[in-house]
Image (cartoon, rainbow, N blue to C red):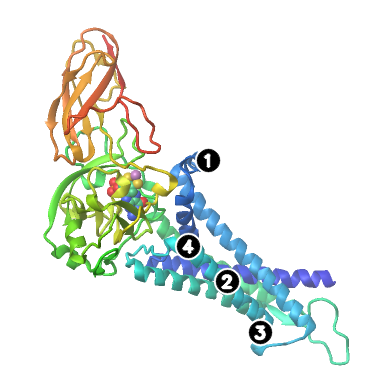
Amino acid sequence: MRILRWLAVLAAGLLAGLVGTLIMALVMVSARYWLGISPPPEALPDRLAPTLDIPTFFSLFDKYGGYNGLKKFGIRAGLLGLLGVGSVVGILYAAIVEWARARRPSTGRWGLDKVGIRFIAITAITMWIITLVVLAPVLDANYKGLAPTYARIASALGLVVAYLSYAIGLVLTYRFIIQPIAVPADQARPAGPAARPIDRRAVLAGAVGAALVLPIHSLMSRLYRQATFTYDGTRFPANEVQPVIPNEQFYVVTKNVVDPRVTKSFWSLEVNGHVEDAKRYEFDEIAQFTPTEVEVTLTCISNAVGDRLISNAIWTGVPMAEVLNASGINEGAMEVKVHAADGYADTFSIEKALEPTTLIAYRMNGEPLPQRHGYPARIIVPGLFGEKNAKWVTRIEVVDYDAKGFYEQQGWGPNFVVPTRSSFLQPDLRQPIAVGSPVNLKGLAFAGDRGIGSVDVSTDDGQTWTRARIDYAGSGQSWSLWSFAWRPTRMGDYPLLLRATDGDGVVQTPERRGIIAEGATGYHRVIAHVTA
Ligand SMILES: Nc1nc2c(c(=O)[nH]1)N[C@H]1C(S)=C(S)[C@@H](COP(=O)(O)O)O[C@H]1N2
Ligand SMILES: [Mo]
């Protein structure tokens, strides 16, 4: 009997804990959807990702089905974690309340037990502090674009409101379900808990909890529809060689499950750190600086030789130098650390930051930056890998030490200069070529901000080389497009090779190097099948 009564009150605690967790989940998902405040199941993976080394990071890709699979796993694990902790705390709460009640019945006002209230308050505050400490580096994220200074406050407040909503939900639900067992004064109290759940009320509480699942599910589905799963890893289309890639076809890489949706009026850009005069700019104030236009190709460090995680666009924005100089860079400044609305950060040298082509860009191919490419503003830093080109930028911090970016902490780099590469794009050489007929081979060559000097093609696996025609030279910070008229005269398999020379006269290295840790190098080699 005694054990059954214990089980009944602990089950009531579990139920109350679940209802509390669902209330908290509703608060968290609402705060995420409307205020851009990142909940722990989203923030914690972001906190952990940079602490993994590259082999672990990649083995997790294998284990969970790529970056997207890993992202989904992270969120799911976080949600289960919340449910787990919420349930356990609910059970503990019931145990403590009933242990106290058994010793001294009816200890508090409104039928609330003082020991229980103290326990839940201390637990919620402790959890809050632990979360703040653990998530400290990512608290400056705000997916609506709030500047980091305010974002940190918003994140901390969002968390405390969520945890308190759990605590209050738990306490009130438990209070609602449980009825103290009245014992006449002249009788001895039975051993074990002096309370029992009221069945009908437990069912009602369960129903309320179940009803909460609806709005949570609806908000989560809206976020899911915005998720990056459908477009992360987009490559520019292979079937067309265009000098400038239209915004909708530009390659995309993002660390996020749901990318920032910045509200322009919410957004501002902080410039601070090792400067004389820290500043914060509204969007219109950034747009008031004299704009510059630069054509720059971006490519991801994880773009394999011959792959298409690379695209070219014309970017409009203000040179970062103008904005930095307006704040006065202090003696000893070494790097800029650029922070973004998604908690992402990356760094490059102050010299690179001051080059006239390094931009705070707000237009892409003449249009406002698309949301997935960093609306309302991103960094464009020619010559360095894509990851340095932070999207949704919210803060430029000047630092006097060697700061590390999101991926750099995993062990990427330390050199992020794009090596010279070239690749075949057309025609699709999986299709056989008819012997004796002319083929126009086409492709790209890219050497970061060194520009392309020339491109050579070999149709005999590197024994002889012939200069290709440069059809589109580009800007010196962009790719060049080349073509090569070829007429194979005998049947068989031809190993085609390509070799670019950069604007400084340095020839592309043939040395094959993998993506890790400074990006792939080596010749793009494809086999042309020439048939009758
Ligand atoms: N804020 C933020 N900026 C970011 C990233 C990110 O996840 N968050 N990804 C980086 C990486 S790894 C690359 S390759 C480029 C891709 O830019 P794009 O999607 O506009 O092509 O953005 C970089 N900037
Ligand atoms: Mo990247």
| Viewer-side residue, 505 vs 56 | 505
Of 426 and 413, the residue lying toward us:
413
Labels 1 and 4: the sequence-earlier one: 1
Quick one: label 2 or label 3, which is nearer the N terminus? 3
Q: Position of residue 241 (x, y in %)?
A: 20, 33
Q: Is residue 66 above or below residue 102?
A: above
Residue 469: image location, x then y, percent:
13, 25
Q: Residues within 10 Å of mark 4 (few under 14, many from 20)?
A: many
Tell me: residue 205, above or below residue 298: below
Q: Residue at x 35, y 69 (%)?
A: 149
Mark 3 or mark 1: whose residue is earlier in sequence: 1
Q: Is residue 439 visible?
A: no
Element carrying mark 1? helix
Q: Position of residue 72 (x, y in %)?
A: 48, 50
Q: Residues within 10 Å of mark 3 (few under 14, many from 20)?
A: some
Numbered circle sitting on residue 112:
3
Secondary structure of the residue carrying numbered label 3: loop
Residue position marked by numbered label 2 in the rendering:
126
Q: Is mark 2 within 8 Å of ligand 1?
A: no
> Which residue bears the numbered disc 4?
135
Q: Which residue is mark 1?
A: 63
- Depth check, mark 1 against mark 4: the one in front is 4
Coordinates of residue 237 in the picture (x, y in percent): 27, 37
Name above or below for residue 65 compared with residue 351. Answer: above
Q: CA distance from mark 2 to mark 1?
A: 34 Å
Give the residue type at disc 1: Lys
For marks 2 and 1 on the same chain, the one whose residue lies earlier in the sequence: 1
CA–CA distance between discs 2 and 4?
Answer: 14 Å
